[in-house]
């Protein structure tokens, strides 16, 4: 048994102690948080019950004062002081267990009527329950708790002003409430643990405290944690705080309706943690059993390690063999996918190369005989090369999600311009028809991608019509989801059609029903990706024996930009000033370098060539007339971007054109800086002329 195995089992033994300890610690912290959360919830529930009880008591007191006010409203003070009023007040107070007495006080502060005869004539002039109402109507006022002079019980008073019809002060109505009634209720609803239930005024004066303590303060200081919490959230809430010189407490409080009083319930955090300590005992027992079990298992594993070492070595060998087999399987799957892709691409390229080479061979024979009627063969070769370039762009777009270049496009004009190409491509056995919607609006799409999509669908339709047939391309107004206006382009054939299971998978990449080597399975997935990326939708209507219709629904152009025409332009004429400008062509492929230099020379520029970056730098040092550096991006040794950086360091006024076959920056294509242009391969002579003209114009104006 090697050292690593021994060390591993030593770590397992240590883990047998550490893991249960870590689990115990995590469980303990979680359980403490849960216990405290439940304690806070219990406080909030208790405070809610206290609030409901106090609200009903104060509402009942206010209703009682309303009845007293109604009774005394149209009576004189001599009538109010009669025995009949005393009897009425006694009857009113009788069912109110919370009330000790009900008083009617005259404007001079004397009790003129009371539910208790012993209170008659009592002077309340110096009591705030009377004084606060003299100057203005403040609504319900709650006085501080005091000792009742008759039975010694602690009471607090709820009072309200009486006013004459013209608004003058006409005494007060007072209901004295006993604190014992509240304390008894609070004791009944509280849990059988240490707690404190309070009914207090907004200024901190304690009206009721349960349990009562002889040395307890009659008013909470403004610095008390509970008072700070109430001032912060007067309507109610929960908080944790530590009174000066005390232990941490947990509070819950609620304001009693619109009355200037609060109910509060609190308990010590230590009381809540007592349950947590009980839980820790259970967790500790579980952790101990777990630790002993793990230690025993680690010891048994250590004993069996030697016997299992040989089996582990066999397992490693088998695992390595399985990994190798899986790698071979993945490689075979990759090669199968590559075979499907390259077979289809090779088929398409062979067709295009046949067009190009056939046109060039006929052109060569005609020129040898002196025949000058060669224009259509040149057009055929150029058209085949253009289609090959588009096929390459399709493959790059599939691999890298090449960004679209949408612009306003006339759908009828674009399709009409493709009819001759389609007829030549599909052959004489396929009849091509068009049905255009009159005055179809312009659509906002990438013209090249739309042409590729229609050509793709047309070739698929031809393959589905083995004995020939009819291909119809239609345009019609349509709408997209959400009501957006659109144009539907339908490519319809009279072929064999597709069953539902094939229609359901038609847009999947690499899915094809064609024989191996006849298709890549990318055509319809490319069409689907282009249409959805353009903001449109695509659907297939097909059934066996009934042909197929593929409908591309594309959004219309809603701006004012002019609709662009399609088609190849004429070769730009030479400009006399170009001959005085020199272009350095850098390309490691001799054929491409020669072709690029010939094309640039055909445009009227003077050209120099270099096979690599070092030769290009040497040429720049010896020939100061070079105005533009035309360089490939990927070259052995010094690549295009590095060459451009060094060349512009030596010649800051030098303009640079990169020629690259990559689809976009960041994937092999350069990030152009000021004074640099990127030209995508393959490019037309018109594209090359425009790039050179722009750079030489910028160099001349610099």
Image (cartoon, rainbow, N blue to C red):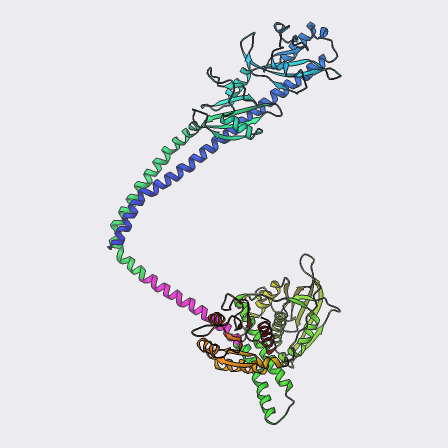
Residue 376, above or below 342: below
Q: Nearer the viewer, residue 255 or 297?
A: 255
Q: Nearer the viewer, residue 166 or 140?
A: 166
Quadrant placement of the C terminus: bottom right
Q: Nearer the viewer, residue 457 or 495?
A: 457
Residue 453 within the segment the image draws in magenta? no
Q: Position of residue 295 (x, y in %)?
A: 29, 43
Residue 326 within the segment the image draws in magenta? yes
**Picture quadrant of residue 491:** bottom right
Query: Is residue 511 visible to us here?
Result: no
Residue 282, above or below 336: above
Quadrant placement of the N terminus: bottom left
* Residue beneath the point at 63% across and 16% down: 132
Q: Position of residue 293 (x, y in %)?
A: 31, 42
Q: Position of residue 238 (x, y in %)?
A: 52, 30
Query: Is residue 20 visible to us here?
Result: yes
| Span shown in magenta | 317-345
Taking the view exactly as shown, the residue that stands out farthest to the bottom is 369
Q: How many marks?
A: 0
Q: Main secondary structure of the magenta part?
A: helix
Q: Nearer the viewer, residue 562 or 112?
A: 562
415 relative to 320 in the view: left or right: right
310 relative to 571 in the view: left or right: left
Q: Position of residue 698 (x, y in %)?
A: 59, 71
């Amino acid at each position: 048994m090697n050292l690593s195995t021994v060390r591993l089992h030593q770590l397992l033994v240590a883990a047998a102690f550490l893991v249960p300890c870590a689990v115990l610690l995590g469980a303990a912290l979680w359980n403490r948080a849960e216990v405290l959360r439940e304690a806070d919830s219990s406080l909030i529930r208790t405070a809610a019950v206290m609030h409901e009880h106090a609200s009903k008591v104060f509402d009942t007191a206010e209703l009682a004062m309303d009845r007293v006010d109604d009774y005394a409203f149209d009576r004189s003070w001599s009538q109010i002081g009669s025995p009949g009023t005393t009897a009425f007040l006694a009857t009113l107070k009788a069912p109110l267990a919370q009330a000790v007495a009900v008083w009617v006080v005259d404007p001079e502060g004397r009790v003129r009527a009371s539910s208790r005869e012993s209170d008659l004539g009592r002077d309340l002039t110096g009591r705030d329950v009377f004084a606060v109402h003299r100057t203005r109507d403040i609504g319900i006022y709650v006085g501080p708790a005091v000792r009742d002079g008759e039975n010694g019980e602690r009471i607090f008073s709820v009072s309200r002003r009486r006013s004459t019809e013209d608004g003058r002060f006409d005494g007060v109505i007072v209901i004295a409430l006993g604190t014992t009634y509240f304390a008894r209720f609070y004791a009944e609803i509280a849990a059988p643990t240490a707690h404190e239930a309070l009914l207090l005024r907004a200024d901190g004066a304690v009206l009721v405290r349960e349990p009562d303590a002889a040395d307890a303060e009659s008013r909470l200081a403004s610095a008390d944690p509970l008072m700070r919490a109430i001032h912060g959230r007067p309507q109610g809430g929960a908080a944790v705080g530590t009174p000066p010189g005390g232990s941490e407490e947990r509070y819950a409080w609620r304001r009693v309706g619109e009355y200037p009083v609060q109910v509060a319930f609190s308990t010590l955090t230590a009381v809540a943690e007592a349950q947590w300590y009980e839980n820790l005992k259970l967790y500790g027992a579980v952790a101990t059993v777990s630790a002993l079990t793990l230690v025993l298992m680690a010891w048994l594993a250590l004993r069996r390690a030697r016997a299992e070492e040989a089996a582990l070595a066999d397992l490693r060998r088998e695992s390595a063999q399985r990994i190798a087999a899986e790698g071979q399987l993945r490689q075979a799957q990759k090669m199968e996918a590559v075979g499907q892709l390259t077979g289809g691409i090779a088929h398409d390229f062979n067709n295009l190369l046949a067009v190009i080479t056939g046109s060039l061979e006929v052109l060569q024979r005609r020129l040898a005989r002196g025949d000058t009627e060669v224009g259509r063969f040149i057009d055929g070769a150029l058209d085949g090369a253009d289609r090959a370039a588009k096929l390459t762009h399709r493959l790059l777009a599939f691999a890298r999600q090449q960004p679209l270049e949408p612009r306003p496009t006339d759908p009828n004009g674009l399709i009409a311009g493709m009819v001759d190409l389609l007829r030549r491509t599909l052959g004489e056995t396929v009849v091509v028809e068009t049905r255009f919607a009159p005055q179809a609006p312009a659509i906002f799409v990438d013209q090249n991608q739309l042409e590729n999509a229609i050509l793709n669908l047309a070739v698929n339709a031809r393959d589905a019509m083995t004995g020939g047939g009819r291909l119809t391309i239609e345009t019609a107004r349509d709408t997209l989801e959400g009501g957006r206006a659109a144009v539907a382009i339908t490519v319809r054939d009279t072929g064999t059609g597709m069953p539902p299971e094939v229609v359901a998978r038609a847009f999947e990449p690499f899915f094809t029903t064609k024989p191996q080597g006849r298709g890549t399975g990318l055509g319809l997935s490319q069409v689907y990706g282009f249409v959805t990326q353009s903001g449109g939708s695509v659907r297939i209507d097909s059934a066996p024996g009934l042909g197929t219709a593929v409908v591309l629904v594309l959004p219309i152009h809603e701006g004012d930009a002019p609709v662009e025409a399609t088609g190849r332009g004429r070769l730009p004429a030479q400009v006399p000033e170009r001959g005085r400008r020199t272009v350095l062509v850098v390309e490691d492929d001799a054929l491409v370098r020669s072709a690029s230099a010939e094309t640039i020379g055909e445009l009227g520029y003077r050209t120099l060539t270099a096979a690599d970056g070092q030769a290009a730098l040497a040429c720049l040092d010896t020939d100061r007339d070079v105005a533009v550096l035309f360089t490939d991006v990927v070259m052995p040794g010094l690549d295009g971007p590095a060459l451009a950086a060094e060349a512009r360091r030596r010649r800051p006024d030098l303009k640079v054109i990169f020629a690259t076959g990559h689809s976009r920056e960041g994937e092999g294509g350069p990030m152009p800086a000021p004074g640099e242009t990127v030209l995508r391969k393959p490019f037309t002579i018109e594209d090359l002329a425009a790039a050179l003209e722009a750079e030489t114009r910028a160099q001349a104006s610099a």
